[in-house]
Image (tube, coloured by chain):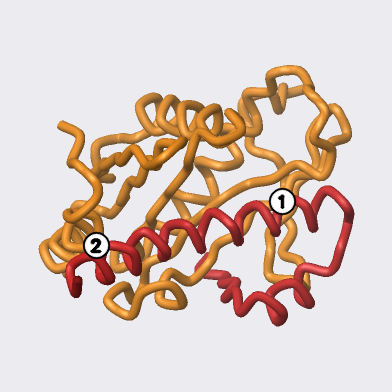
Chain colours: A red, B orange
Amino acid sequence: MKTAVKKEEQKNVFRQMLDDKRAIRQCIQKKGDLKKLAETRGIKFATPV
Amino acid sequence: MASNSQLPYEISKEEDQSYTFVTKHGITYHAYFLDYNGYHPAFTDVYTFNIEPEDDRPHPIDKRIALTVVHILQMFFRRHENAMIMICDNLDGKEMKRERLFSRWFAAYNDGSIRKYDASVSSDNYMLYVSLYLHKANPRQQDLVRAFYELVKNELYPID
C-alpha cells in the first residue's frame, strides 16, 4: 500500500509539471498574465541566466 | 554586410520572469525556467526549461530559433551546478514533437560537456519521457543522477 502511494506521488510530480506546462502554454498563447498564473498555481519561475 | 543567419536572436528578460525573442517571421517566443525544487525537495539548482510561441500556428523552420535556445542553455550551464529536467508526454502529439526536436538540438550542438540521462514510462493511455541534463563538471552529479533515478525507478525505465 505504501509503495503504491509513493508511486502515485512520483507520477504526480511529473503529472503536475506537465499540467503546469500546459497552463503556461495557454497563458502565453492568450497573452495572459504569467505572474498571476504562477501565484494561482504555485509555479516557481526562475531566471538562472 | 555580414549575414546574421548564424546568430541567435536578441533575448529580452521580461517582468514575468520569462525570456523573449522575436523571429524573422515576427513570432514572439517565450523561454522560461521553472525551479524544480518546487516539485521535489531533493532537487536544488535543478530547473525545467521550455519555449512557447505566442502564435501556435505552423510556421517555417528557422535555424536561428535553435541557435537562440542553445545560446540560452550555454549561459545556463556556465554555472556548472545548474541541471535541467525535461519531461513530455504524447497525449496530444505536440509534446513528443518538442521532445524529438530538443533531442535533435542536443545531439547537434552538445560539445560533449553536457550529459543526458533518459527514462520513460507507459501509463493507461500515454507515454511519459523524462530526461536529466547536467554539466559533466557538476559537483553534485552523482547525487542528482541517483535522485533522478530514485524518482523514476518505481514506474519509469531507464533508456540506454
Give the Cα separation between the discs numbered 2 and 1: 25 Å
Picture layout, residue B25 above or below residue B134: above
Q: Chain of mark 2?
A: B
| For residue A26, side relative to residue B157 (left or right) | right
In this rendering, do the residues under marks 2 and 1 share a single chain?
no
| For residue B81, side relative to residue B74 (left or right) | left
Write down the residue under mark 2. B151
**The disc label shown at residue B36, or none:** none
Q: Are marks 2 and 1 in contact (CB under 8 Å)?
A: no
Q: Chain of mark 1?
A: A
Name the residue located 28 percent from the left edge and 54 percent from the top edge. B134
| For residue B150, side relative to residue B92 (left or right) | left
Label 2 Cα crowd, 10 Å radius (few <14 / some 14-19 / many 20+): many
**Residue at the outermost top position:** B60
Image depth: mark 2 or mark 1 in front: 2
Name the residue located 57 percent from the left edge and 32 percent from the top edge. B66
Label 1 Cα crowd, 10 Å radius (few <14 / some 14-19 / many 20+): many
**Amino acid at circle 1:** Arg
Write down the residue under mark 1. A25
* Quadrant (top left, top right, bottom left, bottom right) of the C terminus of chain B: top left
Label 2's element?
Answer: helix
Q: Quadrant of residue B104?
A: top left
Residue toward you, A10 or B79: A10
Residue A14 x %, y %: 42, 58
**Amino acid at circle 2:** Leu
Label 1's element?
Answer: helix
Name the residue located 47 percent from the left edge and 56 percent from the top edge. B75
Picture layout, residue A2 above or below residue B63: below
* Quadrant (top left, top right, bottom left, bottom right) of the N terminus of chain B: top right
Residue toward you, B11 or B92: B92
Residue B92 x %, y %: 61, 33
